[in-house]
């Protein structure tokens, strides 16, 4: 189960079955996977990915967090470093209970929904380098403003996703400017992009459109742009 609600609901289901005297044909297990969201350690869904054999255990444990911490050491610190190897359980079936994480069911007045597809995810970190200069004396035509360039990327993503006939969504969830002073033109803008679409072909198209936009923006704004893939 993913999230506090899913884990607690799983425990409640097991307790209710025990109280009812129900004897299952197979053993039932409640599982909480490590680092499903990927906010502190990248990539997301790391625990389930390792369990399914999609990522090496030692590689995952060596992951560096956004605060500089190491995943394996943090698991040991909080007492969550397990003693079993990934894959020691071979489930016959798997059920995940999850909050919607969105407003659609509530808007439609529907209490429960079944998942029809999964969102494909593309996470990137974008770094734009321009030139710091005085905000009061540098003409607009002579600026290499990393902040303005970042704003144009954000606008491009919002406009494109909003006009898309597919369920594409785009989010810029973090952003930082350097030197981060009120009277200085930003010399650097660093931000993250979260692109999602349940269709792999559509997601690739969005990635390609973004890459093309970044290339053209770098030339027109006089900045350099570096894109780093964080999760795919």
Image (cartoon, rainbow, N blue to C red):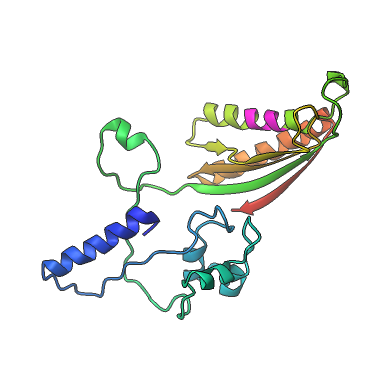
Could you tell me residue 184's position as x and y percent?
Answer: 81, 29
Depth order, front residue of 117/143:
143
Against 62, residue 2 (above or below) is above
Against 181, residue 52 (above or below) is below
Against 225, residue 51 (above or below) is below
Span shown in magenta: 150-155
Position of 30 with respect to 216 (left or right) is left
Could you tell me residue 181's position as x and y percent?
Answer: 76, 33
Tell me the chief SS of the magenta region. Answer: helix
Position of 178 with respect to 46 (left or right) is right
Res 55 visible: no
Instruction: Identify the residue at horizontal 33%, vertical 53% (top origin).
Output: 5
Q: Quadrant of residue 174?
A: top right
Q: Is residue 67 magenta?
A: no
Position of 201 with respect to 115 (left or right) is right
Could you tell me residue 229's position as x and y percent?
Answer: 66, 51
Q: Quadrant of the N terminus?
A: bottom left
So how many labels did they put on this image?
0
Could you tell me residue 146's position as x and y percent?
Answer: 77, 33
Q: Quadrant of residue 149?
A: top right
Against 225, residue 65 (above or below) is below
Depth order, front residue of 4/10:
4
Depth order, front residue of 214/187:
187
Instruction: Identify the residue at horizontal 69%, vertical 28% (top origin).
Output: 152
Res 137 visible: yes
Residue that extends furthest to the left in the rendered view of this protein = 20
């Amino acid at each position: 189960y993913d999230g506090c609600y899913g884990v607690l609901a799983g425990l409640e289901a097991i307790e209710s079955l025990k109280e009812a005297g129900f004897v299952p044909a197979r053993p039932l297990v409640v599982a909480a996977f490590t680092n499903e969201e990927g906010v502190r350690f990248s990539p997301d869904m790391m625990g389930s990915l390792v369990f399914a054999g999609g990522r090496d255990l030692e590689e995952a444990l060596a992951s560096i967090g956004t605060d500089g911490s190491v995943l394996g050491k943090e698991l040991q610190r909080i007492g969550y470093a397990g003693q079993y190897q990934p894959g020691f359980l071979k489930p016959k079936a798997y059920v995940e209970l999850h909050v919607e994480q969105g407003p659609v069911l509530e808007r439609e007045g529907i209490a429960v929904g079944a998942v029809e597809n999964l969102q494909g995810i593309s996470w990137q970190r974008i770094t734009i380098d321009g030139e710091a200069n005085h905000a009061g004396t540098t003409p607009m035509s002579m600026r290499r403003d990393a902040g303005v360039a970042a704003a144009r990327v954000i606008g491009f993503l919002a406009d494109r996703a909003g006009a898309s006939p597919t369920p594409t969504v785009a989010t810029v969830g973090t952003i930082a400017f350097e030197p981060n002073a009120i009277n200085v033109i930003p010399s650097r803008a660093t931000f993250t992009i979260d692109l999602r679409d349940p269709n792999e072909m559509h997601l690739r198209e969005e990635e390609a459109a973004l890459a093309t936009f970044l290339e053209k923006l770098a030339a027109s704004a006089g900045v350099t742009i570096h894109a780093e893939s964080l999760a795919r």
